[in-house]
Amino acid sequence: MRGGTGTTTTALTALVLVGLVGCSGEPGGASAPASAAASAPGAAAPATDPATDPATARAFASLERRYDARLGITAVDTGSGRTLVHRAGERFAFASTVKVFIAAAVLDASSDADLATVVHYDRGDLLEYAPVTSEHVDTGMTVRELIDAALRSSDNTAANLLVERLGGPDAVERWLRGIGDRTTRVDRVEPDLNQATPGDRRDTTTPERFAADLRAVLLGDVLDAADRRVLRDAMLGNTTGDATIRAGVDPSWRVADKTGTASYGVRNDIAVVTPPGRAPIVLVVMTSRADAAAEPSDALVAAATRAAVAGLTG
């Protein structure tokens, strides 16, 4: 929120370093593996990362073979500082997971009065996936309501209205640069950003980068406490992630997440997961396949989550 913490770039960069060291419509994807992903860019087996134990590395590689997919993981136990990674520095299309940072940028730039401002739009503004905004064309929605719709329901129209309020995709990317992210590219709005052609760097990031960004906005001081609460509460109520990260952890764990789905079998989920009585875990799972028509797989994301959590907590 404007007038909030005023965190310096130096402090933000330090936070990011600590974190690393220590879409189309969002109803889920198919669980069965698709074919022919081995030719996807970066699909060759990655070098073993010393931060990931051999058993967990083998589990991730086995999932790639089983689902014929490319899998990117960053998992950080914020209590112990232990980190597990797999293809964490490779680029993946972020799809609707970027809505977390669109919302964070709007919150950071907005006063309470700004958040209460009603944004009017018409039916011509509605995209195919607009489960919330389509119900409020006559009345409009407040900025706060648009944030909630974009995060809780992955409403694409809500996300685009927020991006427009910021000044376009470039403004979102500039905000990310301001919190130390030199990796993520934000080039297009919904639904075009879901054209996840292999090799196209537009609208991509890396698992390690989004893990650092997510830790910064939900657990750090990039946002003030009130704005963090708005972001976290909407993500805790996410309606699109029951079959992804949530399906890979114990039901007693609190999961604040945002999913994303795109072409080429892209199915992503980014989350802060909090086990009872323990420090939060920051978890980013990104997946893709070689075929443009390949089905996204919720089951792959859930299985990768189970492997990551077992590696961190076992």
Image (spheres, rainbow, N blue to C red):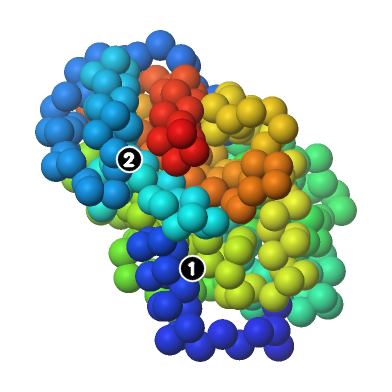
Q: Residue furthest top?
A: 32
* Residue displayed at 58% across by 25% down: 247
Relative height, residue 141 to residue 95 (above, below):
below
What whole-number distance in Å separates the C-alpha atoms at marks 1 and 2?
A: 23 Å
The N terminus: image quadrant: bottom right
The x and y percentages for residue 125 are 63, 50
Mark 1 or mark 2: whose residue is earlier in sequence:
2
Q: Which residue is identified by label 1?
A: 172
Left or right side of 125 for 140: right
Q: Give the residue type that dot 1 points to.
A: Val
Q: Residue at x 76, y 79 (%)?
A: 111
Q: Nearer the viewer, residue 121 or 62?
A: 62
Q: What label sits on residue 254 in the rendered view?
A: none
From the top left corner, tell me how far across and down residue 43 is, in percent.
Answer: 17, 33
Q: Nearer the viewer, residue 119 or 231?
A: 231
37 up-or-down from 6: above or below: above
Identify the secondary structure beneath mark 2.
Answer: strand
Numbered disc in front, either 1 or 2: 2
In the rendered image, residue 67, in percent from the top left (x then y), is placed at 31, 18
- The quadrant in which residue 129 appears is top right
Q: Is residue 168 visible?
A: no
Q: Amino acid at mark 2?
A: Gly
Q: Residues within 10 Å of mark 1 (few under 14, many from 20)?
A: many
**Image coordinates for residue 305, horizontal then vertical, percent:** 47, 32
Q: Residue at x 75, y 60 (%)?
A: 230
Residue in front for this viewpoint, 286 or 175: 286
Could you tell whether 180 is left or right of 147 in the image? left
- Using residue 35 as the reference point, say whether residue 180 is left or right of it: right
Q: What's the residue at 31%, 64% (across, down)? A: 183
Residue topped by disc 2 = 72
